[in-house]
Image (spheres, rainbow, N blue to C red):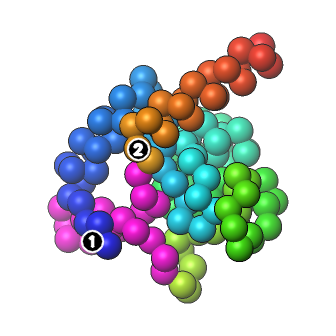
């Protein structure tokens, strides 16, 4: 288990080197897809970052696209996993100043986060 204070967590997000908090990226512990606020918004979880913030790093965006449960082997598609369930498979806990331990998806590496942000930027250009 990787435990971080809120400060360390924020520093790690900043270290991903993406332009906006909407591109902060995490890895679902079950389906291993890299995901950010953009995926949650695109999946219909909420209209903007403030609305999807509570799902980020907690619920796989596949929950909002009707994805099935995780396959035995990651196939690049999302799943319906959420850390709020009975089984706990999270790899990261963020400890807030009140001492509460908040389970979160593992952080994507800076390389993964930047590649993911670039992928979304490329898709946005195609659809505009
Ligand atoms: Zn997933």
- Residue at screen point 58% across, 58% down: 32
Q: Is residue 118 part of the magenta span, yes or no?
A: no
* Image quarter (top left, top right, bottom left or bottom right) of the C terminus: top right
Label 1 – label 2 distance at C-alpha: 25 Å
Foreground residue, 39 or 44?
39
Residue 25 image offset from top left, x and y in percent: 48, 43
Which numbered tag is attached to residue 59? Answer: none
Foreground residue, 65 or 126?
126
Question: Which residue in the structure is indicated by mark 2?
Answer: 109
- Residue at screen point 49% across, 76% down: 89
Which numbered tag is attached to residue 100? Answer: 1
Residue 100 image offset from top left, x and y in percent: 27, 71
Cβ of mark 2 under 8 A from ligand 1: no
Give left or right: position of 62 versus 32: right
- Is residue 74 something one can see in this rendering? yes
Q: Which span is picked out in magenta?
A: 88-107
* Image quarter (top left, top right, bottom left or bottom right) of the N terminus: bottom left
Question: Which mark is in front, 1 or 2?
Answer: 2
- Residue at screen point 78% across, 53% down: 65
Task: Give the secondary structure at mark 1.
Answer: loop
Task: Give the secondary structure at mark 2.
Answer: loop
Give left or right: position of 118 versus 107: right
- How many marks are shown on the rendered structure? 2
Q: Is residue 45 above or below residue 30?
A: above
Q: Is residue 86 above or below residue 101?
A: below
């Amino acid at each position: 288990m990787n435990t971080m204070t809120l400060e360390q967590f924020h520093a790690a997000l900043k270290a991903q080197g993406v332009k906006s908090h909407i591109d902060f990226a995490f890895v679902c512990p079950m389906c291993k897809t890299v995901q950010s606020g953009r995926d949650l918004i695109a999946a219909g979880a909420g209209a903007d970052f403030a609305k999807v913030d509570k799902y980020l790093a907690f619920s796989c965006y596949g929950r909002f696209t009707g994805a099935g449960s995780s396959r035995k082997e990651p196939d690049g598609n999302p799943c319906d996993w959420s850390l709020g369930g009975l089984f706990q498979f999270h790899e990261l806990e963020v400890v807030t100043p009140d001492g509460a331990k908040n389970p979160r998806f593992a952080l994507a590496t800076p390389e993964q986060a930047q590649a993911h942000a670039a992928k979304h930027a490329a898709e946005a250009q195609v659809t505009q």
